[in-house]
Image: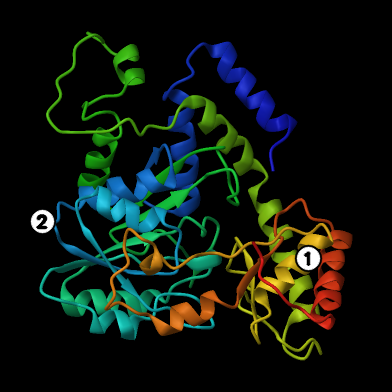
Amino acid sequence: MVGETELAAVARVFESGWLGQGDVTRAFEAAVRERLGVAHLVAVSSGTAALHLALEALGLPAGSEVLLPSLTFVATPQAVLAAGLVPVFCEVDPWTLQIDLSDAAQRVGPRTRAILPVHYGGAACPPEEVRALAARHDLRVVEDAAHAFGSSVDGQALGTLGDAGCFSFDPIKSLTCVEGGAVATSSGALAARVRQRRVLGMPADGWSRHTGTKGWHYDVSDRGYRAHLPNVNAAIGLAQLATFDEARARRQAIVRRYHRALGEGSGLPGIRPVTQPSDAVCPFTYVVRVAGGRRDGLMTGLRARGIATAVEYVPNHVHSLFARPELTLPVTEGVFREILSLPLHAGLTDGEVDEVIEAVGEAMAEPITGECS
């Protein structure tokens, strides 16, 4: 949610005359770094850019394989490709939708160099199991924490558990810059490579040159991209950080309300929540599994009642870009036919949540036929 506070922050950037990456971006980086408790935080233009730059900064040989779940947004494997690497799709646990690490272990080959766990819905992919698999096979770990800003496990922020953690601050995330992302890391060398490549391989950004001596001079020693975060976007993110804890608490309260009505013992057959209430999780989605081939019909019934839902996501191994006849992931394909995301954002009132719950019950009580287009 954005409003007058964010608008005022943007206005101050307009008044400053410096709209691109600059002092506000640095302030945003410092604030996020402090919140995460991580040594280095590099703000970039999107979560996809964060994944791409972090993977590239690892310096893996071209064509190296990266383990990742198929059930993730297509940005994840696209970033792997952009870094010159090869995505290897793995199954997910059917009830957490986190990567199935036993399946991932079976897919390790001689070219496997990294694992990219996705913290689906804001909940944690088990960190100790990820670390153990990585240690056994000498793999680098890059966390896709696009859903997981504000979530933690055992008191440690998600996105700070591997070689690098990548965040998204796009319009639908729990914290938004309208567009933006970040790479978190304990490695100063990795952070420096990401920082340089986000500004076309230049050793210093425009703000640094503007505020230093001989600001016109620069030397480009590495390839790079246009992937910086401007002051305008950073200002929105800083304004959001001021009220983030309230928004996080509201999301958690909505999940608890859904869960009381739809969880085990609710008396509503055919619906089983994937998302679980947790004080350690800033929930990005509220996902249920709808049994009996009724998912698409339920979507249609809710749409007829003015309630938008989503399926997150189409498994990547069935997309034309990645599909191979020999690659089937039956668990992932099975859960894909059942998962449904109900409305979840900090602006929902209790009354609106109750309307969704009532509509789910009504729609599930009706004969459901046809496909959702």
Residue 185 appearing in the image: no
Mark earlier in primary sequence (2, 1): 2
For residue 98, side relative to residue 203 (left or right): right
Question: Amino acid type of disc 1?
Answer: Leu
> What SS does tag 1 mark?
helix
Q: Residue at x 42, y 65 (%)?
A: 118
Question: Amino acid type of disc 2?
Answer: Pro
- Counting from the top left corner in percent of width and height, residue 164 is at 32, 56
**Above or below: residue 363 compared with residue 266:** above
Q: Quadrant of residue 294?
A: bottom right
- Can you identify the residue that label 1 sits on? 302
The nearer-to-camera label among 2 and 1 is 1
**Above or below: residue 5 compared with residue 211:** below
- Can you identify the residue that label 2 sits on? 61
- Counting from the top left corner in percent of width and height, residue 194 is at 27, 41
Q: Which mark is residue 263?
A: none
Q: Are marks 2 and 1 in contact (CB under 8 Å)?
A: no
Pick out the residue farthest to the front.
370
For residue 227, side relative to residue 146 (left or right): left
Image quadrant in which the C terminus is located:
bottom right
Give whichever of 174, 38 is nearer the camera. 174
Pick out the residue farthest to the right.
351
Mark 1 neighbour density, 10 Å: few (under 14) some (14–19) many (20 or more): many
For residue 273, side relative to residue 237 (left or right): right
Q: Residue at x 50, y 41 (%)?
A: 31
Give whichever of 333, 156 is nearer the camera. 333
Image quadrant in which the N terminus is located:
top right
For residue 276, side relative to residue 223 (left or right): right
Q: Quadrant of residue 91?
A: bottom left
- Counting from the top left corner in percent of width and height, residue 48 is at 39, 47
Q: Residue at x 83, y 78 (%)?
A: 361
Q: Quadrant of residue 250?
A: bottom right
